[in-house]
Image: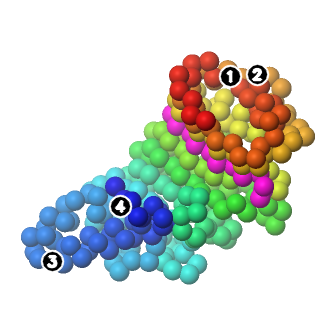
Amino acid sequence: SLRPHFLKRSEAKAVAMVTSDAISLTHVCKRFRVVGLQIPGFWNRISNASQPIPLSVRCERAANFNVEISIQSGRFHGTGITPFLQATRPFSERWRRFSHGCQQDAGRMPLQIDELKDLAHETHGLRAPVLSDLAIYYPKSIKNNSHRHVPDDVFHHYSTWTVPKLRKLSISQLVPRPFSGSASLSSLHIRLDFAVCEPGPNLSSLVEFLTASPRLKTFGLSVRSLGELKTFSTQNRHVLGSVEKLNLTFFRCVGASLHTFFDRVSFPKVSSIKL
């Protein structure tokens, strides 16, 4: 696993540092090199962050492992989105985890709109049969008015993927749309900040996604600055009988709006709530 202080960096940068450490170790002596090249944890994480070893070599060394793919903006440092995905997509059948962007304030290298377009184009129709973990961290400004002409498919690039073994989805600033992975999902974590999204995330869409995830066991929801809900298209109450754990965080939210949302969903089998 990544060292604790790496959590302050973007995931892609942290992966790059692990690879750099691995290279240093394999250069100590022949014995260290033989052993080091056989350790999956050194090579099964591939990122586009700037590294001292070519991408082609990193892909070659990961040839016998299921891999984790981490992407950050390549605008200033590292490999661009298109060449990186063109190098790694050919072995998408071994992708185990995929992430892009930065979790909360870790690092400051979110993908720009043109990079998101490249990501959507290069991964359209992706088949990842062993992918179990998908993490999408958008910046707070991702859905503001300056991006209103960007097609939704650019933001929901994952919705064209075939991921029959997806178990965990983490996403920030955007409510996901139902897709093939919804059917197998067991853990969902969403972070929404309404103070910086104009228009704000659609909670009716969140109810729609939850009802499309029949195997969901753990649901985490973090909401900040939720104001008054002027409309809520979902009127019926939906019973989500598979959910067993709730992790809820609310900050500066209008109580009536939260009541409206939770009045539309029911979690009758929940045995653990963290608030």
Instruction: Tell me the mark number nearer the camera, choosing from 4 and 3.
Output: 4
Asked if residue 226 is positioned above or below residue 91 in the image, the reply reads above
Alpha carbons under labels 4 and 1: distance apart: 39 Å
Residue 51: percent from left, percent from top: 39, 77
- Say which label, 3 or 1, has the lower sequence index: 3
Q: Is residue 196 left or right of residue 5?
A: right
Q: Which residue was labeled with disc 1?
A: 266
Q: Which element type, helix, strand or loop, lies under badge 1?
A: strand
Name the quarter where the N terminus is drawn: bottom left
- Say which label, 4 or 1, has the lower sequence index: 4
Judge whether residue 216 can be spotted in this image. Answer: no
Q: Residues within 10 Å of mark 3 (few under 14, many from 20)?
A: few
Q: Which element type, helix, strand or loop, lies under badge 2?
A: loop
Q: Residues within 10 Å of mark 4 (few under 14, many from 20)?
A: few
Question: Which disc, if any, is residue 28?
Answer: 3
Q: Nearer the viewer, residue 274 or 131?
A: 274
- Magenta residues, as a range? 184-197
Instruction: Tell me the mark number nearer the camera, choosing from 4 and 1.
Output: 4
- Say which label, 2 or 1, has the lower sequence index: 2
Q: Is residue 236 magenta?
A: no
Instruction: Tell me the mark number nearer the camera, choosing from 2 and 4.
Output: 4
